Image (cartoon, rainbow, N blue to C red):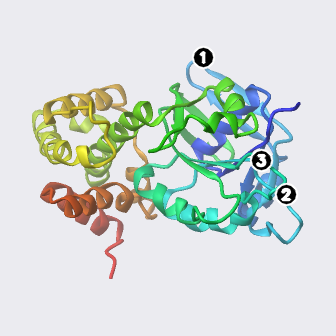
Amino acid sequence: MPPPRIHILGAGAIGLLHTHILAQHNVPTTLLLRPATLQSFLKAGSIIRVHDAADDSTVEHTGIQAEDVAANGKEGKGGIDCLLVCTKAGDTHAAVQSIRHRLIRPRSISHPAIIILLQNGVLALHPTIQSLFPPTSHGGPVVFAGSTTHGAWMRDRFNVVWAGRGGTCFGPISGSPASISDTTGGILTTLNRAGLEYQPPDALLPTLLLKLVTNACLNPITALLGLPNGCVLTPLGRGLITQICTELASLLPHLHAPASQKWSAEMLTDYVCGVADATKGNRNSMLVDVERGGCTEVDFILGYCVTKGEEYGVQTPVLRALWDLVRLKSGDVGV
């Protein structure tokens, strides 16, 4: 039996990098592209290039399949077994909703489709995507949250630099995953063989929460200063991170954290500073978005933390101030 086809929504650095990773393991993939992007892709020969900084090599993939995401339902497109969502958080709900019908399984198919969310702010986004498929409706997909530590950036259109090798993991945020692997038609096995690791909640959630902490610290500070991650590696920078982590240490126990997981402000500060040191030259996505004048994911990171703080009675004045400042900086001041 051939491996299941993986559809990838989002043709940025992370989406194209995972297309490359899956192709290297002979997993069939299809990119779902906006009309203008699809036309550009076809004119470029349906080719993606990935330059691996680890060994200074470049791999060129030809004949990558792609579809017009806006044409779904108009041209008889079939169902989707597995959707890897790599769009920006703010674009994800509308994008998934536009292909919702392709993710609903008919009664003749026993296994559900799988959606894997790989955005920053995935903890905020997950329930909104899950709400597109009410539990009372038949044949809805399993919605997984994911995280990747691969570093990648776009050299130009369809040309990716794989700046740092990492890993990708995904799984359910809550509930018992015991029966999931038996009902996914071999999808999890295929993904695991390609290095996309399925994890149960107790293993996955610490990863997602530490990513939230890292994004809540590094992304807004660097976006406001216009500097790479290493800018926080000063006594003043560490002091600001400690203030953020003090608020987050009080909030994390309310955010699905396993009962056995205990994080102090000092531990979180050490972790974030370690990431900043390892990626000191990186310009993270929020900084790039602000520089380009685009929408940021700040509402799904800092906004999520502030909102959850209000819900659980945790004070978050530093997080709120950073949230407001990034929105002012990017021109996204709301109504």
Structural distance between the alpha carbons of marks 1 and 3: 43 Å
Judged left or right of residue 168, residue 261 is left
> Callout 3, which amino acid?
Ser
For the C terminus, the image quarter is bottom left
Q: Earlier in the sequence, mark 2 or mark 3?
A: 2
Residue 278, compared with residue 289, is above or below; it is above
Residue at the location (79% across, 41% down)? 5
Which residue was labeled with disc 1? 55
- Rendered residue at 30%/48% (across/down): 255
Residue 68: x and y, percent? 78, 62
SS for tag 2?
loop
Q: Nearer the viewer, residue 225 or 29?
A: 29
Percent of width and height locating residue 283 = 40, 42
Whole-angstrom CA distance, mark 1 to mark 2, is 39 Å
Please identify the quarter of the rendering in which residue 168 is found. top right
Name the mark nearer the viewer: 1 or 3.
3
- In the image, is 10 to the left or to the right of 292? right
Question: Where is 327 relative to 50, above or below?
Answer: below
Residue located at (66% from left, 42% from top)? 16
Q: Position of residue 182 (x, y in %)?
A: 68, 34
Q: Residue at x 24, y 31 (%)?
A: 273
Which residue is under mark 3?
A: 110
